[in-house]
Amino acid sequence: MKIIRGDKNCSRCENDYFSDGATEIMKNNNLCIECVMEYHRYMFGAMYNNQEFLSIEDWK
């Protein structure tokens, strides 16, 4: 029996995820939810410290 882990592959970490449950950010940038959340932590941390941050395209 084969376990299906997802129909899409994250461009950053290579994890699989399902496209039918994906957010717009996940679909537009081909990222899994773990990488999207990591980017948001990076972005809000930079904003909190009054630092500039990379766009999601440059970050990945």
Image: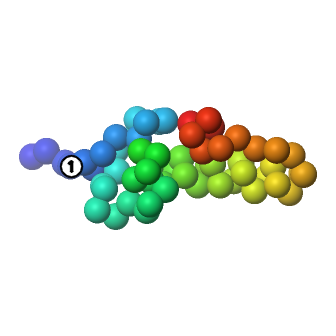
Report x, y in % for residue 9.
34, 40
Q: Residues within 10 Å of mark 1 (few under 14, many from 20)?
A: few
Q: Is residue 5 left or right of residue 59?
A: left
Q: How is the image coloured?
A: rainbow
Residue 44: name its quadrant.
Answer: bottom right
In this view of the protein, can residue 5 be seen by the observer?
no
Query: Who is closer to the viewer here, 56 or 17?
Result: 56
Could you tell me which residue is drawn at 43 percent across and 62 percent down?
A: 23
Q: Is residue 1 left or right of residue 12?
A: left
> Where does label 1 land, which residue?
4
Q: Is residue 35 above or below residue 19?
A: above
Q: Looking at the image, which residue is at 31% across and 56% down?
A: 19
Q: Position of residue 15 (x, y in %)?
A: 39, 41
Q: Amino acid at mark 1?
A: Ile
The residue positioned farthest toward the left in the image shown: 1
Q: Place residue 56 in its image quadrant.
A: top right
Figure label count = 1
- Report the quarter where the C terminus lies: top right
Q: Left or right: where does residue 7 sit relative to residue 1?
A: right
Q: As rendered, which of 51 and 21 lies closer to the eye?
A: 51
The residue lying at 49 percent from left, 35 percent from top is 12
Q: Is residue 7 visible?
A: yes
Secondary element under disc 1, as helix, strand or loop, is: loop
Is 60 rendered above or below residue 6?
above
| Residue 33, x across and y down, in percent | 48, 54
- Please state the horizontal and vertical placement of residue 43, each as a whole percent of the image: 72, 51
